[in-house]
Amino acid sequence: MQNEPRYLEGKAVLITGASSGIGAAAAAVFARQGAAVVLAARREDRLAALTAGLRAEGALASHVVCDVLRPGDAARAVEAVLERHGRLDACFNNAGVGGDRAPLHLMDDEVYDRIMDTNVRGVWNCMRHEIRAMLEHGGGAIVNNSSVGGMVAIPTAAPYIASKHAVIGLTRAAADEYARQGIRVNAIAPGTTRSEIIDDWFARNPEIERQAHASTPQGRTAEPEEVAEAAAWLCSDSASFVTGVVMPVDGGFVNQ
């Protein structure tokens, strides 16, 4: 129906890792559903271009430069939302990194530290400041981006697997701790999803793309918008009785 209400109408939303991939798709999806979106990432040029594009389509969008590894940056990102919109209704903590593939015993400390710091400490930094703001403004919804790697084992990716399991642990702990204070915390677990990095990887390794499709019951790779739609729904009041959930968005991969 054309007059069907948008399910994020009037909500102020912070999206991290918003300069590309799932984060950029989320900015568009959340805005299309009526949210005022604040995009946060390290690359200001990409943020500015995405923000301008959203505004040209009539969205209420702005951006803030943020490195989630820095607690001060995470705090400033939350403050930016509060200053611009008066409240923080929802957050999509999407920022994260992959990493080099190697057997665990050959993995360098630097790879472990980089992945764990970004994927776990980055979410931790953001959640601390987001929750404080939501407690002061009557509650809210947080969605963390984990991975199917947070639910199953994937060979030669031990630090990444550990980091995404940790994101699910943080999600469940916070969901339990803040449910009675009006804050819902959920996670999504995407499977292989189209992005600049994935497209380049597949172009250089066609056999890996074939294997990825063969291991997914739906037989394809997700589009970033499909993942973003799941996050948007979990941030909305339509999911008002959903908290502590890890939602696979993976074409059936973990169901096998």
Image (cartoon, rainbow, N blue to C red):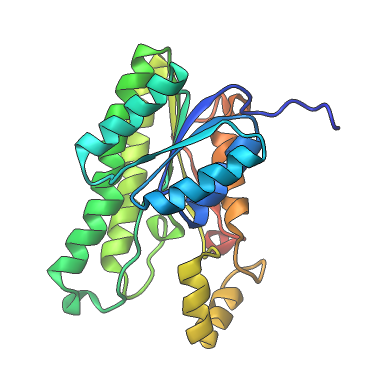
| Residue 177 visible somewhere in the drawing | no
Q: Nearer the viewer, residue 198 or 51?
A: 51
Q: Residue at x 38, y 55 (%)?
A: 150
Q: Position of residue 34 (x, y in %)?
A: 64, 29
Name the one closer to the observer, 129 or 250.
129
> Quadrant location of residue 152?
bottom left
**Residue drawn 45% across and 69% down?**
197
Task: Give percent across and percent down for residue 55.
Answer: 60, 38
What residue appears at the point 36 percent right and 28 percent down from the top-left corner? 80
**Observer-nearest residue: 55 or 146?**
55
Extreme residue toward the left, this view: 109
**Image point (50%, 82%), residue name:** 208
How many marks overall?
Answer: 0
Residue 240 as seen in the image, left or right of residue 246: right
48 relative to 173 in the view: left or right: right
Q: Quadrant of residue 93?
A: top left
Please name whichever residue, 68 or 93, is drawn nearer the observer in this view of the structure.
68
- The quarter in which the N terminus is drawn is top right
In the depicted structure, whether residue 83 falls above or below residue 220: above
- Residue 129 x %, y %: 28, 28
Residue 90 at least partly seen? yes
